[in-house]
Amino acid sequence: MRAGLKTASVQVFFVLAMLALWFGVTSAAMLHPLLLPEPGKVWAQIQKLAVTGSLWKSAQVTFYEIICAYVLAAVPGVLVGFLASRTVWATRFFEPIFAGIFTVPLVLFFPLFIFFFGIGPNAKIAFGAVYAFFPIALNAIAAFSGVDPLYVRGARSMGATTRQLFMNIYLPGALPGILNGLRIGSVICIASVLGGETISAANGLGHSIALSAELLDSAQMYAWVCYVVVIVVAINKSLSAIESMAQRRAQ
Amino acid sequence: MANSPSNVSPRPFESMRQLASNMVVGRLALLVILLLAWEIYAQFFADKAMLAPPSSIISALGPKIFGDPAVFAAIRLTLYELAIAFSLSIIIGLAIGVSLGLSDFGRSGLLPIVLLLYAIPQVVLLPLVVMLFGIGPVSKIVFGFSHGIFPVILTTVTGMRSVSPLLLRGAESTGASQWQLIRHVIFPHMVPTVFAGFRLTMTVTLLGVLLAELFVSISGIGYYASVFGQSYDPAPLFALILTLAFMAIMLNEFVRILERRFSRWKQ
């Protein structure tokens, strides 16, 4: 607990030092204002984006894409993870295939998603779903194949049905690994949706950053970056907290 | 179930080898079936403007990818950017990682800053990086480097911490200098951890370089990807992407071989 407090205070100190540096550099006019605008101007843009509602309009699109993509990754990911680990042979057959595909940076295939789905939200949903599917499935395979076969045999010999076997033996036994995969998947899902929006989109948070950079409105771009960083870090932190809470309850 | 390794066989090695070869044959068979299904679907059922059969993708490789000097140059440039970004990540990441891992101040005072920066979703900074460094190779190298350096720093610090304090105290008490300590005790012990991190570094560096390449759609690979896509000519688009995917797999295997070579001393 004390180490965590120390870490947090170092981080807060660093952020404050960076802010001070930002004020210093811009007031001494050491960098072109296009590259690093004054903090006051960025603050004005931060307020403007919230007041005019453009923040909510962009965030809505991005949240919609992230949620759809995540559901489309998580449900098949866990299901495929379960099916692929039914026998030792299947695990050893399928696991290297998924692991091999996942080592290729899947952003390579993003032009194909644009080609098939256009530049609307569907391309980002499909891209985020495919990217996040792999860590979820890989962790689910590892988790399900790690369930002690003794429990399975015990339950079966007492006459458990397949459904009961899944709900009462496999799922609780594999839960910690599945949760871990779901959290990694959420980080990857958010990053790939934002990345897709940045590369090619008509709206959304990633697109707003890219558009204001293209228009050379750097104060607005920094404002968007601030918002997105805060939102994403907050989501990731709270999901980690939920995961560790669930892990503790699962034990 | 005949292949299950839990079956006790009189010659376990034989059955293991059989199992392994079955796996490879099985995966190849799966690949062939998928390719055949794709070929048949694309030839007879799909819209030709949307999906190309594997045969025409392969025949597009020659004239449209490797035969076109401009496309080939774009791929070569990407490899060159990747090589520089990867080497910079490793050299600078190792230097920062070692200096952070050496002292208590580094571990408790500076490492939290690295972790804070690592938590930032880097892709939101992509437009800023291109604005700062232009649309040329520099911005791609910078973006690949900023992705690659974090795993190197973190695995280096972890690797240095994995050295038993007993060995450190032993070396110190026999009068080893700081440099001797690093060279003869810390360095050999952190090699396996650090090299295991190199494969992740390769993947994320390539991710960064490709993100920047695709974001800048007026030159390089991003340009050809959007040109092929907009002209509704799927064969060269698929061929370009498969070439890059093949490249990624080869690089990954290359780092895996390096990793095996360098952690051999521990066995």
Image (cartoon, coloured by chain):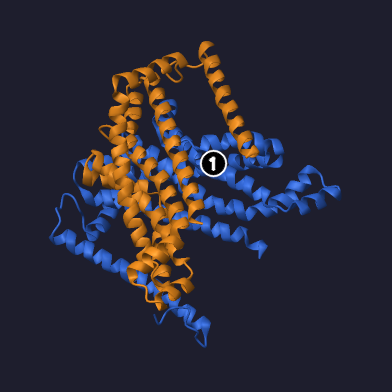
Residue B228 visible, this angle: no
Chain B, chosen colour in render: blue
Residue at far front of view: A158
Is residue A69 found left or right of B185 in the rendered image? left
Indicate whether A223 appears above or below A250.
above
Q: What residue sits 71% from the left and 38% below the top?
A: B104
Q: Please name whichever residue, A32 or A37, is drawn nearer the observer in this view of the structure.
A: A37
Q: What residue sits 44% from the left and 17% below the top?
A: A37
Q: What residue sits 35% from the left and 56% below the top?
A: A77
Give the image quarter of residue A56: top left
Q: Please name whichever residue, A217 or B245, is drawn nearer the observer in this view of the structure.
A: A217
Residue B1 visible, this angle: yes
Indicate whether B70 appears above or below B263.
above
Q: Residues within 10 Å of mark 1 (few under 14, many from 20)?
A: many
Work out which quarter of the rendered image holds the N terminus of chain A and state it.
top right
Judged from the image, the secondary structure of the residue bearing numbered disc 1 is: helix
Is residue B167 found left or right of B124 in the rendered image? right
Is residue B84 found left or right of B108 in the rendered image? left
Give the image quarter of residue A65: top left
Tell me the subunit letter for badge 1: B
Q: What residue sits 80% from the left and 50% below the top?
A: B169
What's under tag 1, amino acid-wise?
Phe
Chain A, chosen colour in render: orange
Residue at far bottom of view: B10
Provide residue A51's location: percent of width, then percent of height. 32, 19
Provide residue A200's location: percent of width, then percent of height. 29, 36
Provide residue B201's location: percent of width, then percent of height. 51, 47
Provide residue B68's location: percent of width, then percent of height. 30, 46
Q: Identify residue for label 1.
A: B150
